[in-house]
Amino acid sequence: MISLSKFKTPLLIIIFLLFSAFLGFLLYRLFFVSSIDVPTQTDGKNYEGGLPSAVDGEGNIISDGKSGSLSLSPTEIQNITPSTIAKGGVTETVQLVNDPVLGFSVSNYSNNAQYYNQSDGKFYQVDENGNTTLLSNKVFYNVENVTWSNTDNKAIIEYPDGANIIYNFNKDDQVTLPKHWEDFEFAPNEDKIVAKSMGLDPDNRWLTVSNDDGSSAKYIEPLGEKDSTVYTSWSPNNQTVAMFTEGTNLDRQEVYFVGLNGENFKSTTIEGRGFESIWSPDGARILYSVYSSDNDMKPSLWTVSAQGETINTNRKSLGLETWASKCTFSDNTNVYCAVPRELKEGSGLFKELAESTSDVVYKINVLTGLKKLIAIPDKDMTITNIYTNKNETTLFYTDASDNSVYKINL
């Protein structure tokens, strides 16, 4: 009988060597192969769904996939040659107006932006090439707020002392509105306005609709002491004139839609507080932002259908941490949003925490939720008042640090 004892030691050695080789192979696969077998992106776009991140135009990945978060520091961004057109990487920003502005907007009927110049007290238009046009020779001193009509020929101008006027730039004339009116919006066809009529007595506070000269005022709904939760917002389809919110618990509210004739519209549920919203151009949906304890009190973007029987359907989170006021619809489906590179906990509750945060720009399809990083401004920018022109070649915006006008080529 053959004894196996003399083979025992060599066999154990061989088994140990084979195990060590196998373990070494696993470690190699884990730490080396997985780190280098990452597909590189060549089209300069950042897509959701696990595809590669945005690049700076030279094949260098600069996004880590988080909302607004970048792996490049501000210094590294400044050292990259910017693209003149937004392609997903560092993009050239061009200053169009040097003076601080107020009431910045873009006309729905032209490629021009419009604004009040705080330095000389006059109103102007500026095109994508930086050419400015005076809208009126009249000087408007110490304007506090501006609400434009859907064209560029009328604006509601508010002053610190409570005085309000509607000025028609085509006719060069004005109409005075009551001092106790505030939070104005024009109707889509511009012949009417909605406002809050704020009497001293809470029982004399109303949501009001009138002609654009202030005549034929009609009380729509009483405000009482809940005016802060009522938002004048005339829908583009002329269906509703305002929204108001009512809390159901700490992190949930109902949004109700107010029509002109006491219609009983459905409400929609929102998961958070600090409601801000903008309408799609066809009035079919709203894009809104809220903050909640589920998101460290940071603002998050959502969309929901908001027309007729579809109200409260198709509600979805868009997975970006920013405010609706930093977004603009380019058509009924797509929005451009300025998204902070990072946000501190509680910034939804205290916006001042984000006053010096640099933004990047995303384009989002609100139907599919698909989003892509399209531009990283080559200067530190806290973007406000963001708009596209009608042919979607230019993104106009203001910077919170100096309130002047900039653009990015799309």
Image (cartoon, rainbow, N blue to C red):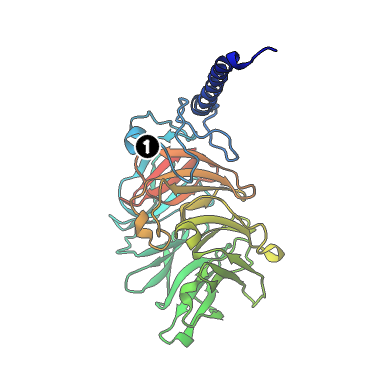
Residue that numbered label 1 is attached to: 378
Picture coordinates of residue 164, whole percent (x, y): 40, 71
Image coordinates for residue 255, horizontal then vertical, percent: 58, 69
Total numbered badges shown on the rendered structure: 1
Q: Residue at x 60, y 66 (%)?
A: 269
The front one of 359 and 215 is: 359
Q: Say which element carries label 1.
A: loop
Q: Which residue ends up furthest to the left in the rendered image?
A: 119
Q: Residue at x 67, y 75 (%)?
A: 264
Q: Position of residue 134 (x, y in %)?
A: 38, 51
Q: Residue furthest front?
A: 1
Work out whether residue 291 can be spotted: no
Which corner quadrant holds the N terminus?
top right
Quarter of image, res 8: top right
Q: Indicate the amino acid at tag 1.
A: Asp
Q: Is residue 158 left or right of residue 302?
A: left
